[in-house]
Image (tube, grey):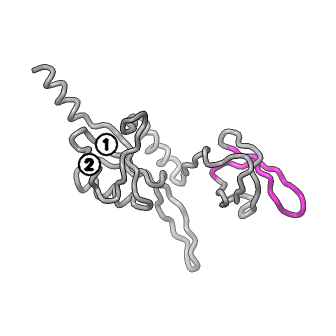
């Protein structure tokens, strides 16, 4: 009887997981899951978008194509069958579990820094061509010399000379 109670407790315990979604479906999926009674969290950042006639602040997902869900084992199928959910993110053959403290930290960071942006350092390497998104050198293009933590050494091509500057990764956009 004691084993059965332990098993029931494990089956009902809710933990955070990450689901991979269709592109630009993050907020829709969060809403659909919440309507279905599932705790879902799509962290968003605030960004100012410039149109020809106005500037508007919009909310964009912090992590493209990812939504966090807090579920128990019984709710797994409900999440998987939600339109727009592709699959759970896996780590070592099992759905990747996220600790509560990590979700709390994301919420805290977004509260303190609403325009926070998540940038993968794995996307940038020496030799890549980039364009600077903001700062003194906005819209200048260059080549990455070296990635140093969260900063990058970039050679800026302009004025027939090479200007070398250290730029935060978040201010760069990769050029294809």
* Residue interval drawn in magenta: 151-170
- Residue placed at 29% from the left, 47% from the top? 39
Q: Is residue 47 magenta?
A: no
Label 1: which residue?
A: 70
Label 2: which residue?
A: 38
Q: Is residue 154 magenta?
A: yes
Q: What is the residue that sits farthest to the top in this orientation?
A: 2
Q: Up-down: is 80 above or below 48? A: above
Q: Secondary structure at mark 2?
A: loop
Q: Earlier in the sequence, mark 2 or mark 1?
A: 2
Q: How busy is the neighbourhood of tag 2: few (under 14 within 10 Å), some, or many (20 plus)?
A: some
What type of secondary structure mainly makes up the magenta span? strand
User: Label 1 near label 2: C-beta < 8 Å?
Assistant: yes
C-alpha gap between disc 2 and disc 1: 7 Å
Q: Secondary structure at mark 1?
A: strand
- Residue placed at 48% from the left, 64% from the top? 58
Quarter of the image that includes the C terminus = bottom right
Give the percent coordinates (x, y) of residue 88: 36, 45
Apparent side of residue 74 relative to residue 164 in the rendered image (left or right): left
Apparent side of residue 99 relative to residue 166 in the rendered image (left or right): left
């Amino acid at each position: 009887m004691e084993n059965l109670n332990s098993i029931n407790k494990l089956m009902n315990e809710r933990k955070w997981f990450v689901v991979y979604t269709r592109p630009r479906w993050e907020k829709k999926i969060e809403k659909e899951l919440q309507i279905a009674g599932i705790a879902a969290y799509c962290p968003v950042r605030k960004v100012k978008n410039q149109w020809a006639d106005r500037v508007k602040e919009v909310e964009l997902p912090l992590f493209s194509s990812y939504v966090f869900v807090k579920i128990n084992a019984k709710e797994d199928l409900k999440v998987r069958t939600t339109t727009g959910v592709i699959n759970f993110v896996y780590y070592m053959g099992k759905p990747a579990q996220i600790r509560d403290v990590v979700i709390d930290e994301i919420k805290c960071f977004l509260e303190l820094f609403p325009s926070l942006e998540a940038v993968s350092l794995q996307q940038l390497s020496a030799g890549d061509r980039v364009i600077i998104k903001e700062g003194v050198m906005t819209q200048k293009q260059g080549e990455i010399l070296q990635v140093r933590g969260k900063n990058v050494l970039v050679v800026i091509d302009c004025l027939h000379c090479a200007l070398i500057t250290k730029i935060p990764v978040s201010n760069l956009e990769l050029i294809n």
